[in-house]
Amino acid sequence: MNLVCLHGFTGTQQTWHQLADLLPDAHVIVFDLFGHGSSQVSERFTMDEQIDAMDRLLADFDEFALLGYSMGGRTALSYAVKYPEKVTHLLLESASPGLKRASERAARRSNDEALACRIETDGIEAFVDFWQNIPLFATQRDLPDEVQQIIREERLSQTEEGLALSLRSVGTGAQASQWGNLASLSMPVTLITGQLDQKFCTIAEDMAEHIPHVKHIVVEGTGHAIHVENPAEFATIVKEQLKMN
């Protein structure tokens, strides 16, 4: 079983090392998305350019299951829409198809531009101090100190230019809405959200109404990053959904 995993904003391929250890029967394929880790870029890019680059990286694989978290989930969905013949099963963790209305996307682009400027002006460490304390990640404050430190170090490994370019290029406001393409997804789709992340639970419920072959799984007692907050349960869900032994 080939499983491609896409990390979220401020993440790297390291995000998935624990999941790979918990899935010994899977061939877990990971890489850094543009602007993150070792995949640095010097100019703006589009979501199409990101997923086409992914497709080139995955040229040796005829098909695979595809898992994406948050920003990586938006990327995974965009890939599955463009290259549906390659994706045997799509798993989206705390992800959205983007924003439905142009006015919403314009407002989000403005917010993302302000955040990109903040990163460039204040530097990575000040940004990470801010980012780890936003409400979206409140549930992570209850994690063991060593787990929180691993997450922090992954975020600190980024560059100001890379994160700013990611926001400006494939932030939620920059990407095209995929809401209109959900009905065309022919592969099984699993939506995974944390019970304490009400915003993304609601988004997933809305998505599920449009996707033909879909299952929405809500994990009790977790927030946005289920794979971090309850890694064993997350791995079990992936195994069961992909019918792995």
Image (cartoon, grey):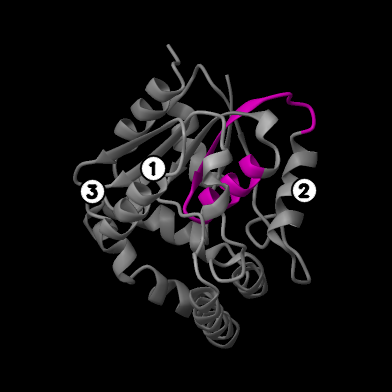
In the image, residue 66 lies in the stretch drawn in magenta: yes
Residue identifier under label 1: 208
Residue highlighted by disc 2: 53
Callout 1 crowding tier (Cα within 10 Å): few <14, some 14–19, many ≥20: some
At label 2, counting other C-alpha atoms closer than 10 Å, the crowd grade (few under 14, some 14-19, many 20 or more) is some
74 in the magenta segment: yes
Q: Quadrant of the C terminus?
A: top left
Q: Position of residue 147 (x, y in %)?
A: 34, 50
| Residue 19 disc label | none
In the rendered view, does 51 fall on the left or right side of 153?
A: right
Q: Residue furthest bottom?
A: 121
Q: Quadrant of residue 226?
A: top left
| Circle 3 or circle 1, nearest the eye | 1
**Front residue of this view, candidates 170 and 207:** 207
Q: In this view, does 197 lie to the left or right of 31?
A: left
Residue 22 quadrant = top left
Type of amino acid under label 3: Gln
Look at 54% across and 21% down and name the residue there: 26
The residue that appears at 27% across and 41% down in the rendered structure is 218
Q: Is mark 3 on a helix, strand or loop?
A: loop
Cα gap from disc 3 to disc 1, whole angstroms? 16 Å
Front one among 140 and 223: 223
Residue bearing mark 3: 195
The CA distance from mark 2 to mark 3 is 34 Å
